[in-house]
Image (spheres, rainbow, N blue to C red):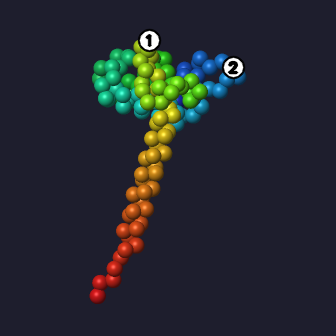
Amino acid sequence: MLHPSYTDLMEVINSDVEEGEQPVVSSRYSIVIAAAKRARQIIAGSEPLVDGRNKKPLSIAVEELYKGKVKILSVDDMDEDDDKILEHTNDVFDVSLEEEEENDDELFDDEKDSDEEEDDEESLDFDEE
């Protein structure tokens, strides 16, 4: 998908931010996380907020972001309940980025553990004579 571009999406998402405030999204990585998280919600059964016929979940998620149907919450905007649940209010889904980043850290820790186990197995070579 060529359009909208990352910069177009960032402009739309940050359009509500007043001058002098920190933008909600400042990198492409945040856009990717939000779109992927929303795509997973659609795959899990959430109703698309835009016409989703003949479109893949990720394309639907990007379109929802671009049309303002999905709002990305900054860490400062989140309540305690927002950490664990998806709120659906006024046909706008709130997608929190914090939980995704924590899950990424856990994933990397799991990968490190499995790599260490493989290294241990490799070091147990016995000489056969």
> Which of label 1 and label 2 is nearer to you?
1
Quadrant holding the C terminus: bottom left
Q: Type of residue at label 1?
A: Asn
- Judge left or right: residue 128 versus residue 24: left
* Front residue of 87 and 18: 87
Q: Residue furthest front?
A: 80
Image coordinates of residue 124 in percent, x first then y, are 37, 74
Image coordinates of residue 106 in percent, x first then y, are 45, 46
Q: Residue furthest top?
A: 90
Quadrant holding the N terminus: top left
Q: Dot 2 surroundings within 10 Å: few (below 14), some, or many (20 or more)?
A: few
**Location of residue 59 by image quarter:** top left
Report if residue 12 is visible in the image.
yes
Image coordinates of residue 83 in percent, x first then y, are 47, 30
Q: For residue 56, which numbered disc appears in the image?
A: none
Q: In the rendered structure, which disc, 1 or 2, sits on the residue that comes first in sequence?
A: 2
Tag 2's secondary structure? loop
Q: For residue 90, which numbered disc appears in the image?
A: 1
The answer to whether 111 is drawn above or below residue 129 in the figure is above
Q: Dot 1 surroundings within 10 Å: few (below 14), some, or many (20 or more)?
A: few
The answer to whether 103 is drawn above or below residue 31 in the figure is below
> Whole-Å distance between the Cαs marked 1 and 2?
26 Å
Quickly name the residue at label 2.
19
What residue lies at 38% left-to-right and 17% top-to-bottom?
49
Tag 1's secondary structure? loop
